[in-house]
């Protein structure tokens, strides 16, 4: 059974009708990202070291807000985060992330660096806060 079929079965077990469509990246960008033509989408979003680069995407007027998320307090916090630094900036972004978690525009369902599987003899795996796979540090 392929991953898509398994995902469809899991949705159906919840009583949801499934019309699974696996699409090419260009199609996803056009239909989901640009046109907001979807009910559910599973996509990998790479992280950034600066949280603003990702969090700004969920502001109400962002063209990158394919979740169609809208919250005036969240928008205000992201604007404040641009002008703050240090602990104040950290607190602002933590509150913004709490709003996202509470109102759930999207769900983080996996961490690709944790998907690494290797024999016990291989040592030196490192996870980074951005999407990087550095095999140079591996040894046996």
Image (spheres, rainbow, N blue to C red):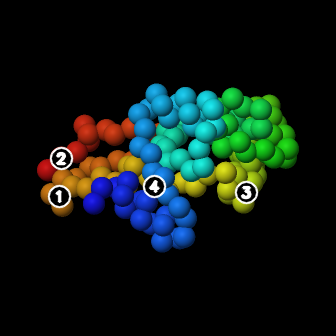
| Residue under pointer 2 | 139
* Contact (Cβ within 8 Å) of mark 4 with mark 3: no
Q: For residue 104, what is the image quadrant?
A: bottom right
Relative placement, left or right, of 27 versus 82 is left
* Contact (Cβ within 8 Å) of mark 2 with mark 3: no
Look at the image and tell me whether residue 86 can be seen: no
**SS at mark 3 in the image:** helix
* N-term-proximal mark, 1 vs 2: 1
| Residue 31 location (% of width, % of height) | 56, 33
| Residue under pointer 4 | 110
Q: Quadrant of the N terminus?
A: bottom left
Closer mark to the observer between disc 2 and disc 4: 4
How far apart in space, not on screen, are marks 1 and 3 (Cα)? 40 Å
Graded by Cα atoms within 10 Å as few (under 14), some (14 to 19) or many (20 or more), the crowding at tag 1 reads few
How far apart in space, not on screen, are marks 2 and 4 (Cα)? 26 Å
Closer mark to the observer between disc 1 and disc 2: 1
How far apart in space, not on screen, are marks 4 and 3 (Cα)? 19 Å
How far apart in space, not on screen, are marks 1 and 4 (Cα)? 22 Å
């Amino acid at each position: 059974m392929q991953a898509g079929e398994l995902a469809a079965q899991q949705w159906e077990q919840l009583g949801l009708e499934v019309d699974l469509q696996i699409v090419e990246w260009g199609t996803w960008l056009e239909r989901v990202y640009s046109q907001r033509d979807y009910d559910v989408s599973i996509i990998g979003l790479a992280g950034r070291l600066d949280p603003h680069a990702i969090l700004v995407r969920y502001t109400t007027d962002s063209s990158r807000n394919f979740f169609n998320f809208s919250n005036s307090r969240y928008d205000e916090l992201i604007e404040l985060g641009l002008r703050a630094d240090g602990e104040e900036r950290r607190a602002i972004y933590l509150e913004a992330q709490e709003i996202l978690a509470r109102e759930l525009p999207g769900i983080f369902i996996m961490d690709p660096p944790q998907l690494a599987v290797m024999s016990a003899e291989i040592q030196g795996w490192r996870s980074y806060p951005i999407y990087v796979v550095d095999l140079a540090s591996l040894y046996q």
